[in-house]
Image (spheres, helix red, strand yellow):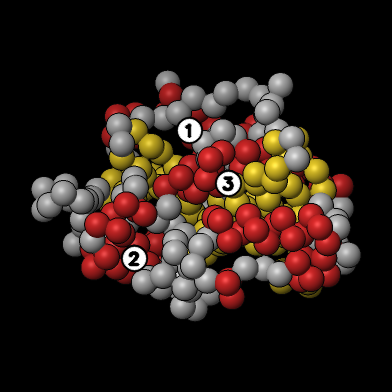
Amino acid sequence: MAEWTIHLLETPEEMTAVEALQRLVWPGSETDVIPAHMLLAAVHNGGLVLGAFVEDDLVGVSFGFPGIYTTPDGPRLKHHSHILSVHPDWNGKGIGFALKRAQWQMVRKQGLDRITWTFDPLLSRNAHLNISRLGAVCNTYLRSEYGAMRDGLNAGLPSDRFQVDWWLNTERVERRLSRRSRPALTLDQYRTAEATLLEAHTDRGPEPSPPEETSSLTGTLLLIEIPSDFPSLKVADLPLAREWRFYTREVFENAFATGYMVTDFVHDNKRSFYVLMHEDSTLQDDETHTDLRG
């Protein structure tokens, strides 16, 4: 049995607890905390706030609201997930995954088939959850999406973000959310498959440096390396962190413009890579990745 329970949050008292958790997870800027009255207004109009509790203590929360996106047939409804936060003492326990799975269930009950959200593409922990475990995909890079952010996690760098698409009714997503474990691919398997790898430099100092080359975007499979622990790198060397921000901005914008889509994330031997494929590859299943496993 899980050590926590998940509930829909709807009361002013519950939203006050959500405010407090935000301050703990994103310290340093009160203006970046979503206030209780805004959370309540959202949930009274189709939004969802889900909380994970250990006994009576709130240890995780997700918050999202209805949105609109444009299609050739006109506007359609979606759900936009704005925050997912877990108490630092409960990181790595599966609470974030459980909250997203509950969100998936609730949004499907609302009759919607798409959830979007944003995250910093240089955060490998978030990439592993969003892309590898949940099955979201990405072909949208947003420059300075939230302007200058002042909280302790984001201050000092442009707030560039991936916008991911979570297609709720696809076989791809349903497989990722199933109880069956999904074998992780290794870098050696991708090398055997002749994937193109854009690898970091590790011989220029204690922290990895981005490659100089950003134009080698060829092949069916493309792997782009990011630092495995970007928050620590940022603390150790802020100028190098800025180099990584502008390198990844350029390489992902170029990749998306030429038809690539982020479809997976690989963490192997303390190295982290996004896996990109061309957009005409299926979102319904993981046939290509299954073939790589042999």
Disc 3/disc 2 C-alpha distance (Å)? 26 Å
Disc 3/disc 1 C-alpha distance (Å)? 33 Å
Check the image and name the residue furthest to the bottom.
Answer: 147
- Which residue position holds label 1? 289
Q: Which mark is residue 87?
A: 3
Relative to 70, is 176 on the left or the right?
left
Q: Position of residue 108 (x, y in %)?
A: 81, 47
Q: Nearer the viewer, residue 113 or 246?
A: 246
- N-term mark: 1 or 2: 2
- Which residue position holds label 2? 245
Amino acid carrying label 1: it is His
- In the picture, residue 74 is in which quadrant? bottom right
- In the picture, residue 248 is in which quadrant? bottom left
Crowding near pointer 3: few (<14 within 10 Å), some, many (20+)? Answer: some
Amino acid carrying label 2: it is Arg
Relative to 172, is 73 on the left or the right?
right
Q: Position of residue 277 (x, y in %)?
A: 45, 48
- In the picture, residue 237 is in which quadrant? bottom left
Secondary structure at badge 2 equals helix
